[in-house]
Amino acid sequence: MPRDLKIPDQRHPEKARKPETPRLKKPDWIRVKAPSGKGYSDTKAIMREHNLVTVCEEAGCPNVGECWSQGHATMMIMGEICTRGCTFCNVATGRPDALDVFEPGRVADAVKKLGLNHVVITSVDRDDVDDGGAEHIAQTIRATRRQSPGTTIEVLTPDFLRCGPEALETVVKARPDVFNHNLETVPGLYPEVRPGARYFHSLRLLQRVKEMDPTMFTKSGIMVGLGEDRQAVMQVMDDMRAADVDFITIGQYLQPTSRHHAVARYVTPEEFAGYEKAAWGKGFLMVSATPLTRSSYHAGDDFARLSAARQAKLGNG
């Protein structure tokens, strides 16, 4: 019998034995309206027509209603099952199907049909594939570029932890406009939050992108409310700047189910404003730090601001 990914214990077999943790009541500033409207319906129809998976749905993003109503959807390629089991993530864990060679073309068709000025393409981790799916990501970039030459492309990639250095080179050579890889949390929480990953490997990945192509924008994000303290967040900012990361996103962690990592606390909007001010002070070209900030939330508008910030910096240099 095939797995039913709508059933939590089948979706997350690695979490089935974990104790349930009480879920904190959400404060007023974290609540959003339920998805509705024609724009939302039209976007959903295009995703279904092209048999595409979106991280908006798979990760349970709170902003799906707002983004889809504007025709903005973040494509999640290489299937809907991830080979990692991060304790914060709602994407299903297990053994994925083989890569779909027709998927890059379907993504490109959907981007064209949606008329996107900027698209975010993310993926599950594919530790079962020799190159971690790097060539598949590159093919998706190239196919999208052919169909929509005026669309700027942002990729949110896995860490390629079990691959040779050529995997990252493959993606960078395909020349996305923005290379995003999320650190997700502070290094001290990696063993419990992101056990299959390594903080300094992810940091070095971002640094290597800049070494290969200094003109490529790099971006990374973390969640707060997992149990970190302010000093650790400040250290992550410094680490990102040392790796020449251009754009930082900071958002509130939301617990998908009672068996996922617990929310330690809800960080206040005032604290987020403090993080934003600190990040600007550390020299990032672009900062997004709010409770509902997610990697691809308002990504198109943010890309325009990112480009303008670089131009202004070069003009003043």
Image (cartoon, rainbow, N blue to C red):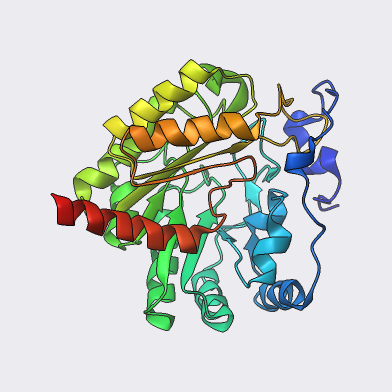
Quadrant in the picture for residue 284 = top left
Picture residue at 40% right of the left edge, 21% below the top = 235
Residue 176 spot, x, y in % from top left: 35, 61
Give the tally of numbered discs.
0
Q: Could you say which is closer to the camera, residue 111 or residue 107?
A: 111
Picture residue at 65% right of the left edge, 63% below the top = 67
- Rendered view: 103 above or below 246: below
Q: Could you say which is closer to the camera, residue 45 or residue 310?
A: 310
Observer able to see residue 91: yes
Residue 144 spot, x, y in % from top left: 44, 74
Picture residue at 50% right of the left edge, 58% below the top = 299
Residue 234 spot, x, y in % from top left: 43, 23
Residue 54 spot, x, y in % from top left: 64, 60
- Rendered view: 245 above or below 188: below
Observer able to see residue 223: no
- Rendered view: 20 above or below 60: above
- Rendered view: 32 above or below 17: below
Residue at the far left: name it.
317
